[in-house]
Amino acid sequence: MVSLETVQKSNSALKGYGPNLVAVFVGGTSGIGESTARAFVSSAVSPRVYLVGRSETRASKIIEDLRALNPDGHISFIKGDVSRLQEVDQACKTIQAKEEKVNLLVLSAGVLTVKGRDETDEGLDKKLSLHYYSRMRFLYNLLPQLTKAANAEDAAPGKQRNLSTVLSVLDARGNSSLILNDLSLKDNYTLRNCANHAITMTSLSMEELAAAYPSTSFVHAYPGIVKTSLVRDRGFLMKTAMNAMMVLLTPFTVPLEECGQRHLYAATNPSFSPRGLDGGDAAIGSDGVRGSGAYLVGSDSATLPDQKVLQGYREDGTRGVVWKHTLDIFKSICGDQGSDTQA
């Protein structure tokens, strides 16, 4: 376990990267995304921040708070239903029109539901899209800006690397078997299968991308039990049940503010280094290799060990199959006419 004191000390060192760090928080208008954005704005020098979400009313209040935390920060809101990949593309185009580089991409948008498969007009299940496909679409579209941030020549004096990190908040502990002939769960949808596929495909895709983009770090984090506003749009009975459950789980929960601090640590601490950086102090990656560029991080900010299911999928080539499937989905829905189509 990494102590909260160590986490806070690391986060305070964010100022050493200098001014004008650019951060994008998808799902940044509530819960874990919001708390991580608050931690970032509090720690950075004149940051440029983009909050992506659905509620302009909530965003306005959060932006007011963030500007009070750091009057030198530039905070913007981008409205969109990011369960739709084409709206993801529009959000990315807005960011790219204003920024040449992105230092930090935090992906935490999600939905709590007891429904079965609930298709968007693009043919994807809404929950699986929010937890996997749309997150990977943001990542895919913004890779040129993340790479440019990593390779920028204006690094802060004394820093061993530029900041270029993708952080997806889901469940880094829960990697499980995939239904390989139905990765998008058209025919085998259950809530458990949805969770398994989103989690495991995230871990595999981040490993694949860490190998292809060695100047950027990719972190899949488990937040622990955190009381957020995820049920705010649910019915009375679900909200009542969830609130009661959270009371029972209080001794085991991670406070929301601490959760934000810990996710900022996972996104910015030098130990979670890119694959291309040769550093003896790097953490153990998701593949068991020190400094591999892809990391699984627990709610206590410590790295999680390589998991047997990931090892098997790595050895038999499934890791590449999953990323190819993801690109095929992008092509079928978007054309592929992304906001900045990759080579």
Image (spheres, rainbow, N blue to C red):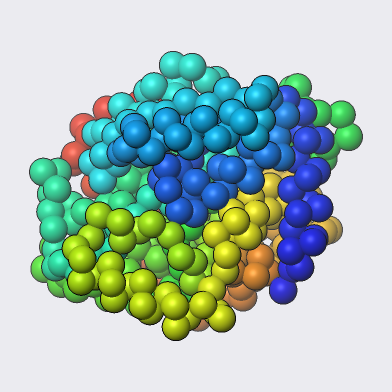
43 or 236, nearer to the observer = 236
> Is 281 left or right of 319, judged from the image as shown?
right
* Residue beneath the point at 38% across and 57% down: 229
> Is 324 left or right of 264, judged from the image as shown?
left
* Residue beneath the point at 18% across and 41% down: 332
| Residue 278 placement (x, y as % from top left) | 78, 50
* Residue beneath the point at 75% across and 40% down: 14
Q: Quadrant of the N terminus?
A: bottom right
Rendering quarter of residue 271 = bottom right
Task: List the single residue furthest toward the top.
Answer: 97
> Is 180 left or right of 95, judged from the image as shown?
left
| Residue 320 placement (x, y as % from top left) | 40, 57
Please say whether residue 251 is visible from this viewpoint: yes
15 over 98 or under it: above or below:
below
240 or 212, nearer to the observer = 240
Q: Quadrant of the C terminus?
A: top left
Rendering quarter of residue 232 = bottom left
34 over 113 or under it: above or below:
above
| Residue 159 placement (x, y as % from top left) | 83, 37
20 or 38, nearer to the observer = 38
| Residue 141 placement (x, y as % from top left) | 41, 34
* Residue beneath the point at 11% across and 43% down: 121
Please say whether residue 286 is visible from this viewpoint: no
How many marks the image carries: the answer is 0
237 or 78, nearer to the observer = 237
227 over 146 or under it: above or below:
below
